[in-house]
Amino acid sequence: MVKHLVMWNFREGFPEEKKEEKAREADERLKALVGQIKGLAFAEMRLNRLPGSSRELLLISELETPEDLDAYQVHPLHVAVAEEVIKPAACDRVCFDYEM
């Protein structure tokens, strides 16, 4: 099993009142990919609500194998969520992957 963690901040000027909505949209769209992309076992987007973190959004996903992670990264359904939902709102991407 591979854990894929990605974190972002919202772009400067992104409306505070839209952050919750954007995180919820990303969460719903990413969760819908489970079962549609081979090896994607879990996906969840979280909005940070506690002080002290250096990022506002967190994607937690689990994939069966490193090869599944590679395929997920370029899968059209995943790319669509990134292009349509996340990239217009977020910046400062940080990623950490590890095998469990």
Image (cartoon, grey):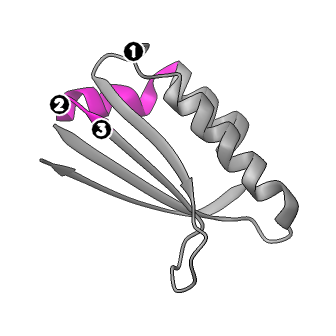
Instruction: Check disc 3 and report the residue beneath it.
Output: 62
Q: List x then y, in percent, for residue 63.
A: 27, 32
Q: Amino acid at mark 2?
A: Thr
Is 43 located above or below residue 34 in the figure? below
- Position of residue 45 in the picture relative to residue 4 (left or right): right
Residue 18 seen in render: yes
Q: Residues within 10 Å of mark 1 (few under 14, many from 20)?
A: few
Q: Residue at x 20, y 29 (%)?
A: 64
- In reply to whether residue 66 is colored magenta, the answer given is yes
Disc 3, SS:
strand
Magenta stretch: dominant SS?
A: helix
**Dot 1 corresponds to which residue?**
35
Residue at (26% x, 46% y) in the render: 3
The one nearer the camera, 40 or 70, is 40
C-alpha separation, residue under disc 1 versus residue under disc 2:
15 Å
Q: Give the x, y percent position of residue 96.
A: 32, 58
Circle number at residue 65: 2
Of circles 3 and 2, which is in front? Answer: 3
SS of the residue at dot 1?
A: loop
Residue in view at x 57 percent, y 67 percent: 48
User: Dividing the picture into quarters, in which one does residue 6 lie?
Assistant: bottom left
In the image, which residues are magenta? 62-76
Is residue 67 highlighted in magenta?
Answer: yes
Q: Quadrant of the N terminus?
A: top left
Q: Is residue 39 above or below residue 16?
A: above
